[in-house]
Image (cartoon, coloured by chain):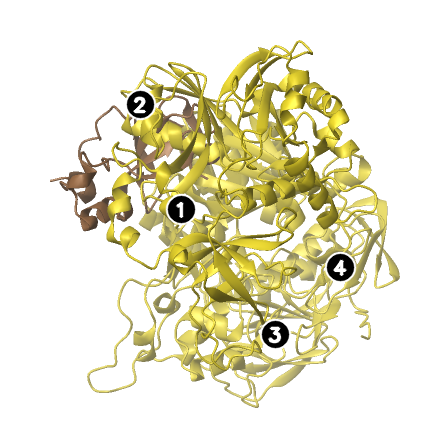
Chain colours: A yellow, B brown
């Protein structure tokens, strides 16, 4: 890319909001340049005579700085550093020392190196949120804060003031504009309940006045360590004042993207705020009065200006045209810029007269210039208003969509409401500030501003704004002498032209939403801020009234009245208006937000809470590999030197089946249930009876949803007549407590039941295997551990040899003789270590969740969430015995629905691969052996192949010396002995269907 | 983010609450007396109006109490909150399910 040096512009000797004592060095594409404190990257580039930025995204056309704000579609840079920021607009990038940037050609590439900066989140409730700190926003914040309300003022720029920063010479509230800004700022910062946030863009507005804003803090983060670089603010506001300004529209003409074509308001901002002159010989092309202010400031800065005004001659002596002529400018009316000379930079503008219909009315004349400032009119920034489904209406006089009906508890003021006169912005802002403060319960104290002295009706107010705005003659597309529309750029970032819009309508697109998606207009980084309304305007020229009948209703800003009809005489209907068409939908974010900011500190270890048992440190020291179960870190297996997972699990399984092993079962959910009606409550919650469970015993229970599906399971102990101790699955603890509370509170408030989660209060060690009795006898010398003295599903309160009180249960999840020792969590690690020591002589082996899974699967104990998926009943699991036929319980009625009793339900079986070494993938589909037809596993079958089931669990069994799996198979129990095909990854394997329980079917090992 | 006024704790952020679906859907007195279709109606069918809707919430990260709220499903405005033992505010459209005699 060749660098076009704009040799005409540069830094003015005086003026601007700059600290000229503080030069700032920066680098762009390897070239060292200098700006001043107060510059943006874009203003520093303009001051260095560089309007030319990267090329366009697809057509690779040279591009230049177009704007001075968040709407910029061209000037994007990568900020180089330890972690590159992939794509930022130069127009909002605050210049800082050592900034190193690379110009981009319309698109950035994410840096795959980690971003090590810190990002924070803030959560705030405010009485009044004021968004925008131009004259309307400042007036609103001042009034809103005067009565003591908690006010947050958001400003996306690094300076307060908004448009006043570009109008430093005007008088505001009897002071200089910048003095006014400073005095209001001082007043706000002195108020104890007010927060002023600069560099903070509200990018999302949601129900209930919930606002999300991004605060950029590079200025402090780079200077001081330990300060987060950006903060995401979550703000709930009682009242919201939107004072968010307006965007100037470019004009769509041939080659309107050549570097040196710039928005007229941006030219003024560069000159007034940054003393940076974008050009010395300027053609100013306008459709309205606002650009004459740019002509004035350019002239003052020493530039020559030729005004090309699309509007016809206005004879009144007070007109802007006459004023400019009196100031010595050349003003050409009823004319347009119809083309640009130059490609790397503007060297001239072709100007021609236009007629009342906007068609060319004469030959084009070349005017030499180095800058073309354009103003196609103004578009109120309605994004945040519209995100809340605030109504819009097209205002023909203002030539823009303006908010027509408010959002509850919100006020729209200033240019964002089509109020362009600064004094009126102050009045409107103050009025809203007072209204918001009053609504929030903190009425404004009396103010010298007399902000609400004028109280016109909405109509009178609007008429006043119409007079203030003057007349606007929108030119949606200026014809080129050669008739082409190929370089009439509508959306420069997306490289979309008027020709593209024409192609969209030619293809039958009528709705602006369809045109947007057909062309990709408004889908770029500026999200339609530059091209949105110009596209709608173009559609009014390309569509006829007849076409508009095909425009679907319901677009924001769309006129309620029906589209224009063909006249009765068959004459062509008049064109639709922008109001007939409406806008596309405005969505968050208003400006781009990095994912790192959204993530905040929730990265890595802080992404989610990690729960560990008291013995976690022991597991780590003993080399456990961990598995996430819910939020818990559970030991998965404990590999020894040279062992892989299979070897470790085989060793752990052998220990549990042949000797003794122990497992940390602390993670099981635990709930205490107390109250006189606790037995009745449990009896209704579980499918099996609990009324007569004796104190001192436990019972396995299954809970179902109302629709009869297995919800959770576990063993519940009866501690006393009115006190139970329930265990739940590790992952189900929270939802089971929710479920119990819901029924207790909403359906059976008459039952005396109190529920407490005690998961964190208890630590549990499972001691498992034929020799577990000997280990428990050593640990708990007071306990009669004999088969007769301590039966299955019983529990005992005892004091361990260590002096620690424990509750020991005889429960098994492996089929082996097993005990569970429950102790207060505080002693969890100590008791775990004591078990390890007591078991040492028996070669006690720690085991993890993988071995637990193998052992329980050999016994066909289902795991909720693995063998079940919300469509599985207890009967499907072969657990008819757990479902009472006599009592009422949750889910019971559903079991008699036809769908539950008809054949075809998937039911639990085991499946054995004929190849004993093959471990089927969990989830593998099972089909009939002859169902494949000619399908070989390559590609997709010609017709769907009916599946009869799928594998839910699959392991290698140490006890059986082979692989095995559990599966849910249609009418599974009737298929025992049959052969099915398992299908996975394009492969097939024969499996034999068997009854679920494969090991110790008679339960002989349970009592040791 | 809605701010939901818990009848017991006062206004709190929506993130503290769990949604519980339509309110005033009574559990049938005698489920066995229902046809399969009536039972399925109770299990699976809920109203989905545009406008005022009485629904259940639990202040799950607060007092853990269940309560009822009337929310406008279009504007998300919550106009009433009331305890489970309080009557539904007058003047609200009745949920058809709640008034239908499912068990009859």
Q: Residue at x 49, y 63 (%)?
A: A319
Kindly identify the residue that appears in the image at 42 percent across and 31 percent down. Answer: A738
Q: Upstream in the sequence, badge 4 or badge 1? A: 4
**First of labels 3, 1 by sequence position:** 3
Same chain for the residues under marks 4 and 1 in the image: yes
Mark pair 2, 1: CA separation? 26 Å
Question: In which image quadrant can residue B59 be found?
Answer: top left
Q: Earlier in the sequence, mark 2 or mark 1?
A: 2
Chain letter of the residue beneath label 1 in the structure image: A
Relative image position of residue A1003 (x, y in whole percent): 50, 37
Q: Residue at x 21, y 27 (%)?
A: B87
Residue A291 appears left or right of A533: right
Q: Nearer the viewer, mark 4 or mark 1?
A: 1
- Label placed on residue A495: 3
Q: Nearer the viewer, mark 2 or mark 3?
A: 2
Nearest to the observer: residue A303 or residue A10: A10
The reply to whether callout 2 and callout 4 are in contact (CB within 8 Å) is no
The residue at which mark 2 appears reads as A680
Of all chains, the one bearing label 4 is: A
**Helix, strand or loop under label 2:** helix
Q: Give the SS element for disc 3.
A: loop
User: In the image, is residue A600 above or below residue A346?
Assistant: above
State the image quarter where residue A683 is shown: top left
Q: What distance separates the C-alpha of mark 4 from that of mark 3?
A: 20 Å
Residue A383, position as x, y percentages in the image: 48, 53
Label 4 residue SS = strand
């Amino acid at each position: 890319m060749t660098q076009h040096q704009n040799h005409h512009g540069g830094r003015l000797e005086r003026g601007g909001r700059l600290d000229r004592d503080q030069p700032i060095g920066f680098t762009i594409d390897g070239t060292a340049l200098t700006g001043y404190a107060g510059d943006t990257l874009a203003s520093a580039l303009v001051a260095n005579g560089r309007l030319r930025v990267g090329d366009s995204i697809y057509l690779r056309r040279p591009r230049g700085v177009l704007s001075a704000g968040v709407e910029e579609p061209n000037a994007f840079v990568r900020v180089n550093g330890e972690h590159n920021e992939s794509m930022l607009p130069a127009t909002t990038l605050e210049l800082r020392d050592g900034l190193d940037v690379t110009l981009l050609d319309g698109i950035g590439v994410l840096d795959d190196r980690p971003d090590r900066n810190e990002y924070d989140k803030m959560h705030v409730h405010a009485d009044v949120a004021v968004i925008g700190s131009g004259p309307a926003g400042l007036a609103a914040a001042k009034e809103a804060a005067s009565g003591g309300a908690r006010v947050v003022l958001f400003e996306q720029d690094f300076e307060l003031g908004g448009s006043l920063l570009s109008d430093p010479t005007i008088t505001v509230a009897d002071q200089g504009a910048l003095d006014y800004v400073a005095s209001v700022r001082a007043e706000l910062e002195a108020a104890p309940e007010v927060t002023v946030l600069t560099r903070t863009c509200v990018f999302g507005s949601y129900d209930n006045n919930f606002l999300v804003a991004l605060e950029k803090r590079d200025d402090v983060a780079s200077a001081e360590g330990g300060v987060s670089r950006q903060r995401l603010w979550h703000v709930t506001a009682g009242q919201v004042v939107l004072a968010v300004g307006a965007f100037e529209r470019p004009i769509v003409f041939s080659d309107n993207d050549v570097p040196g074509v710039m928005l007229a308001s941006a030219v003024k901002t560069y000159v007034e705020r940054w003393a940076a002159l974008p050009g010395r010989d300027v053609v100013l092309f306008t459709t309205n009065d606002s650009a004459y202010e740019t002509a004035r400031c350019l002239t003052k800065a020493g530039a020559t200006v030729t005004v090309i005004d699309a509007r016809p001659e206005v004879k009144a002596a007070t007109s802007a045209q006459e004023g400019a002529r009196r100031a010595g400018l050349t003003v050409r009316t009823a004319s347009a810029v119809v083309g640009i000379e130059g490609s790397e930079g503007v060297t001239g503008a072709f100007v021609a007269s236009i007629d009342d219909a906007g068609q060319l009315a004469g030959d084009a004349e070349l005017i030499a210039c180095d800058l073309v400032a354009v103003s196609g009119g103004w578009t109120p920034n309605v994004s945040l208003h519209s995100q809340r489904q605030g109504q819009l209406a097209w205002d023909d006089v203002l030539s823009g969509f303006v908010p027509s009906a408010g959002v509850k508890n919100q006020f729209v003021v200033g240019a964002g409401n089509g109020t362009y006169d600064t004094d009126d912005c102050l009045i409107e802002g103050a009025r809203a500030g007072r209204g918001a403060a009053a609504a929030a319960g903190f009425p404004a104290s009396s103010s010298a501003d007399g902000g609400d002295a004028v109280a016109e009706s909405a109509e009178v107010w609007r008429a006043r704004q119409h007079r203030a705005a003057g007349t606007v003659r929108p030119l949606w597309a200026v014809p080129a002498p050669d008739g082409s529309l190929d370089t009439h750029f509508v959306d420069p970032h997306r490289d979309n032209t008027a020709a593209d819009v024409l192609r969209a309508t030619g293809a039958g697109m009528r709705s602006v939403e369809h045109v947007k998606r057909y062309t990709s207009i408004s889908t770029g980084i500026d999200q339609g801020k530059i091209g949105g309304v110009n596209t709608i305007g173009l559609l009014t020229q390309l569509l006829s009234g007849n076409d508009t009948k095909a425009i679907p209703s319901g677009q924001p800003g769309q006129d309620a009245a029906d589209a224009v009809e063909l006249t009765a005489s068959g004459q062509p209907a008049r064109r639709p208006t922008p109001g007939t068409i409406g806008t596309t939908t405005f969505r968050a974010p208003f400006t781009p937000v990095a994912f790192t900011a959204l993530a905040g500190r929730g990265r890595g270890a802080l992404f989610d809470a990690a729960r560990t048992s008291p013995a976690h440190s022991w597991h780590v020291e003993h080399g456990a590999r961990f598995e996430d179960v819910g939020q818990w870190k559970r030991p998965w297996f404990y590999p020894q030197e040279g062992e892989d997972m299979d070897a470790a699990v085989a060793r752990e399984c052998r220990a549990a089946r042949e000797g003794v092993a122990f497992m940390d079962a602390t993670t099981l959910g635990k709930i205490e249930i107390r109250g006189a009606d606790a037995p009745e409550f449990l009896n209704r919650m579980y499918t099996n009876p609990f009324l007569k469970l004796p104190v001192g015993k436990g019972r396995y229970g299954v809970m179902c949803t109302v629709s009869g599906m297995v919800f959770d399971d576990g063993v519940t102990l009866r501690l006393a007549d009115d006190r139970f101790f329930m265990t739940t699955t590790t992952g189900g603890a929270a939802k089971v407590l929710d479920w119990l509370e819901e029924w207790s509170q909403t359906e059976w408030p008459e039952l005396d039941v109190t529920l407490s989660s005690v998961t964190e209060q208890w630590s549990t060690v499972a001691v498992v295997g034929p020799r577990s009795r000997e280990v428990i006898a050593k640990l708990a010398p007071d306990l009669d551990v004999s088969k007769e003295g301590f039966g299955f599903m019983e529990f005992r309160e005892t004091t361990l040899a260590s002096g620690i009180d424990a509750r020991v249960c005889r429960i098994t999840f492996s089929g082996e003789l097993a005990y569970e020792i429950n102790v207060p969590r505080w002693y969890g690690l100590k008791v775990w270590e004591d078990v390890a020591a007591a078991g040492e002589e028996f070669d006690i082996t720690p085991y993890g969740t993988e071995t637990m899974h193998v052992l329980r699967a050999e016994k066909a104990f289902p795991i909720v969430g693995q063998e079940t998926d919300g469509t599985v009943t207890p009967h499907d699991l072969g657990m008819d015995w757990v479902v009472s036929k006599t009592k009422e319980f949750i889910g019971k009625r559903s079991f008699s629905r036809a769908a539950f009793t008809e054949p075809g339900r998937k039911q639990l079986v085991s499946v054995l691969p004929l190849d004993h070494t093959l471990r089927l993938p969990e989830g593998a589909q099972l089909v009939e052996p002859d169902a494949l037809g000619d399908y070989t596993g390559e590609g997709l079958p010609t017709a769907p192949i009916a599946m009869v089931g799928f594998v839910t669990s699959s392991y290698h069994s140490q006890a059986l010396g082979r692989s095995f799996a559990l599966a849910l198979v249609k009418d599974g129990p009737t298929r025992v002995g049959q052969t099915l095909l398992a299908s996975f990854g394009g492969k097939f394997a024969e499996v034999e269907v068997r009854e679920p329980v494969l090991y110790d079917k008679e339960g002989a090992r349970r009592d040791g | 983010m809605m701010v939901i006024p818990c009848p017991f704790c006062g206004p709190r952020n929506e993130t503290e609450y769990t949604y519980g679906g339509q309110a005033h859907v009574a559990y049938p007195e005698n489920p066995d007396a229902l046809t399969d279709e009536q039972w399925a109606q109770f299990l699976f069918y809920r109203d989905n109006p545009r406008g005022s809707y009485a629904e259940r919430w639990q202040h799950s990260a607060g007092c853990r109490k269940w309560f009822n709220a009337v929310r406008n499903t279009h504007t998300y405005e919550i106009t009433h909150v009331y305890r489970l033992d309080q009557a539904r505010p007058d003047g609200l459209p009745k949920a058809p399910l709640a008034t239908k005699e499912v068990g009859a």
